[in-house]
Amino acid sequence: MSTVYAERQIDGLPDETPGQDLAPATELLFDPEMVEEEQGLSRHTVRVGNIGLILPHDEVSELVEKAIVYDLPNTRPWFAGITSIRGNMIPVFDLHALFSIELPAAGRRLIVVGEDRTAAAFWVEDFPRLLVFADEDLTTAEPAIPSLIREHAHSYFLQDGQAWVEWDCKSFFAALGEKV
């Protein structure tokens, strides 16, 4: 989540000398934690079949519309291959194949989570959506999701009949990487 910081100007306008660097913010005008508490938990989400996944808020996530994925021989069917993002070779996993989920008719998009050596990518149904989860959306009931995802889940949310999983995708993809 982005945080906005600003400096409160009390004694008139700041010095407008050309080329002068702006001083770092000295006072937070609002507390982002308070905003999140009042509005709920805002997270980007994606779907793989009927599995709702919450993207990690502390990692960079990127949607790649027209990715070129290169197959690697002698790998598992759910390992789609590798793609190059800004010169970094990123492993691409096909969770549809891994969990025997029917492919969407409209095509898929690639989500890259993480940066550099810790990045991994997987195919999703549609564009990520920003959802706001209220306290009452948090559930202790485990949804019907594959055990491999459940092993890396932190919490579950239920909103409008769809279960959403907050998961540790880094450890999930590291575990998959050991099985390739």
Image: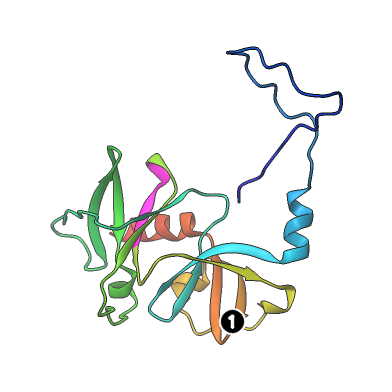
Q: Position of residue 151 (x, y in %)?
A: 52, 69
Q: Which residues are magenta?
A: 117-122
Q: Secondary structure at mark 1?
A: loop
| Residue 146 seen in this snapshot | no
Magenta run includes residue 118: yes
Left-right relation of 68 to 48:
left
Left-right relation of 81 to 38:
left
Q: Quadrant of residue 134?
A: bottom right
Q: Residue placed farthest to the left in the image?
A: 73
Tag count in the figure? Answer: 1
Considering depth in this image, is 68 or 89 the residue closer to the camera?
A: 68
Residue positioned 24% across, 51% down in the render: 82
**Tag 1: amino acid:** Glu
- Residue under label 1, please give it: 142
Left-right relation of 95 to 147:
left
Position of the C terminus, as image quadrant, is bottom left
Magenta run includes residue 76: no
Residue positioned 67% across, 64% down in the render: 41
Q: Residue placed farthest to the bottom in the image?
A: 161
Residue positioned 78% across, 46% down in the render: 30
Considering depth in this image, is 110 or 132 the residue closer to the camera?
A: 132
Dot 1: few (<14), some (14–19), or many (≥20) neighbours within 10 Å?
few
Q: How is the image coloured?
A: rainbow
Image height check: is 113 above or below 98? Answer: above
Considering depth in this image, is 145 or 160 the residue closer to the camera?
A: 160
Image height check: is 77 above or below 50? Answer: above
Q: Position of residue 118 (x, y in %)?
A: 42, 45
Q: Position of residue 4 (x, y in %)?
A: 67, 42
Image height check: is 15 above or below 149? Answer: above
| Residue 20 seen in this snapshot | yes
